[in-house]
Every structure is written in C-alpha cells, then in structure tokens.
Image: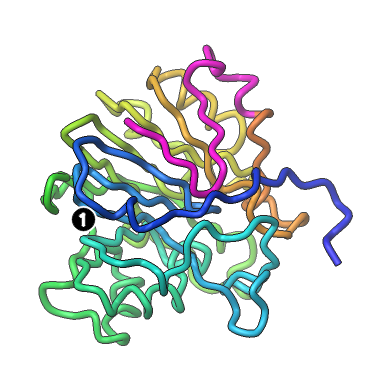
C-alpha cells in the first residue's frame, strides 16, 4: 500500500522513444525520474545518474528497492545507443548497479569519481571506456564538452557507525556540459559551495530541490538559482519514490519555486520523459 504521509508525486510519465536517440539539430533534455537525465546534444547522447531499472518481479518497484510513485519513462534495457554516462557519486539512487550493468553493454564512456569507478571496473568497464571525473579537467564527447565541478555531500556524517566513511570531496562531483546550444549544469548532490555561486554562463540549471541538510536544501536551491539568474531551471530529487520519511527524495517544487525570482518563466516542472529543448 502507498504511504499515507504527504508526498509530491510527479505527473504521469511520458514514454521516451527511439527518436530521442537519433540525429538532431538541437539539444534536448529529458528527466528520467529522481536525479537522472537524458541529453541529446545534436546527436551526442549523454546520461546523468540514470536509475532506470526495476526489480524483476516487481515492476512498480525501482532497483533501489523503493516503490515508484510514477512509472519509468524508459528502462535501461531499452536504450538503443549511448555515448557517455556521467555519475556524480556512488549512492544507489544515482549509481544504480542494475542499470549500470545493462548500460555497460553499450559502447558508452563511463565517467565517475573513484568509488564508482571501482564498481564499474568490477563490472568489466575498463580501459578507454572508463574516465575519472577530476574537477575542472574538461574533455569532449562528440558535440559536448564536459567539465566536472566540485560537490560536498558527506551525508554519512549523520551516523558514520551505521552508514560508513563519509564521502570525501573527491568522491562526488557535478558536471557542466557545454553544447552547441548552451551550457547545462548539474551540481549533483551537494551542500552549497562558494564555487557554485561563482558559476558563469549557465543556460540550464538542473537543480536538486530535496530537503536534506546534506543537499542544497530548499533555501539554498532557490538562492543558487537567484544568484546565477539562469534562464532555465529543471528540478530533480522529487516526485519519484514512495519514501515519505526520507528528506532527500521529497522535494516540493512549489516550495522552491515560490522563492525563485521569475519562476513562472524559468522554472520548468517536467513530467518524467517530457522533452525540454534548450
């Protein structure tokens, strides 16, 4: 049975078809649920933190073990091609192992911080298919230039005895993706850093709106959007999982948008699988 506690659910998912992976004369973005995104930058296909597989015997349950509030717009097994997968860190709602194993069968480049790279290597992703994410070290994939950015996400400090060693700075990152049509920035899961408010030229901000103290949080998510004055914002970390007692999964877009200047024109509340053209 669904939890009775109040949660904001995303709109019904829109199915992502094969046309999203074809050649294009523009850059488009799709929200994959939770913190995952698909980007087609004029035919270069990228994914950020895809968690798009379900439990084999429970199609309404994510591979994270959580019940889905909305269906996935596409599953890993249905991805026809992929140029690169970008992981921000190793939490299982970002680095989803069943999804990663399925996507490893493509010819994609996998980019990640060291803890994720170790897991990927154990899956057989090695050599020139695996790249370390080093802050400010840019590289190109097709039509996209990708630059990792710093992140601060030591959530295990809540209880190190229970959760283990906290993530170190080098264990987490965000990504700037420069495309022919504009600059996309996904900060990843992070507390607000000085580096973040000094970012320049961002056209589309993928914004974590969860309530956790080890994420931006409601106030700092709005603050970052206002300081950078980006023309377009797509929120994530909301509306996906039935986990009412887990603040990281339970952002409320309306709560954040209410504190963003001009939100009616630049805060884009996507349904899973809905296309946004940059």
Label 1: which secondary element = loop
Please name whichever residue, 131 or 18, is drawn nearer the observer in this view of the structure.
18
Q: In the image, is 256 to the left or to the right of 27?
A: right
Q: Where is the C terminus found, in terms of image quarters? A: top left
Q: In the image, is 174 to the left or to the right of 3?
A: left
Write down the region rendered in magenta: 256-278
Q: Which residue is mark 1?
A: 134
Q: In the image, is 8 to the left or to the right of 198?
A: right
Residue 129, quarter of picture: bottom left
- The location of residue 222, given as percent across then percent down, is 54, 26
Please name whichever residue, 30 or 204, is drawn nearer the observer in this view of the structure.
30
Q: Residues within 10 Å of mark 1 (few under 14, many from 20)?
A: some
Q: Where is the N terminus found, in terms of image quarters? A: bottom right
199 above or below 250? above
Which residue is rendered at x = 35% and y = 72% of the image?
A: 115
Which residue is rendered at x = 67% and y = 58% of the image?
A: 241
Instruction: Indicate yes or no whether the magenta region holds residue 235.
Output: no
Judged by its main secondary structure, the magenta piece is loop
Please name whichever residue, 187 or 160, is drawn nearer the observer in this view of the structure.
187
Q: In the image, is 224 to the left or to the right of 62?
A: left
- Which residue appears farthest toward the top when viewing the image? 262
Residue 255, quarter of picture: top right
């Amino acid at each position: 049975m669904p939890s009775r506690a109040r949660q904001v659910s995303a709109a019904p998912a829109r199915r992502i078809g094969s046309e999203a992976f074809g050649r294009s004369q523009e850059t488009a973005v799709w929200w994959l649920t939770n913190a995952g995104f698909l980007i087609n930058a004029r035919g270069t296909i990228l994914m950020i933190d895809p968690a798009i597989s379900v439990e084999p015997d429970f199609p309404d349950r994510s591979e994270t073990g959580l019940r889905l509030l909305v269906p996935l717009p596409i599953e890993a097994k249905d991805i026809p091609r992929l140029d690169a997968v970008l992981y921000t860190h190793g939490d299982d709602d970002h680095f989803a192992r069943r999804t990663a194993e399925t996507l490893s069968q493509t010819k994609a480049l996998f980019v990640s911080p060291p803890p994720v790279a170790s897991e990927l290597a154990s899956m057989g992703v090695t050599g020139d298919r695996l790249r370390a994410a080093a802050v400010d070290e840019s590289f190109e994939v097709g039509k996209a230039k990708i630059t990792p950015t710093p992140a601060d996400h030591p959530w295990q400090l809540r209880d190190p005895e229970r959760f283990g060693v906290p993530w170190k700075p080098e264990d987490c990152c965000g990504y700037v993706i420069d495309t022919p049509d504009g600059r996309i920035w996904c900060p990843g899961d992070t507390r607000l850093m000085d580096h973040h408010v000094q970012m320049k030229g961002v056209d589309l901000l993928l914004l974590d709106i969860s309530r956790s103290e080890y994420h931006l949080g409601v106030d700092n998510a709005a603050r970052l959007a206002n300081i950078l004055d980006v023309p377009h914002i797509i929120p994530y970390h909301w509306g996906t999982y039935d986990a009412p007692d887990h603040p990281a999964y339970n952002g409320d877009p309306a709560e954040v948008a209410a504190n963003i200047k001009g939100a009616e024109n630049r805060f884009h509340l996507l349904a899973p699988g809905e296309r946004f053209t940059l």
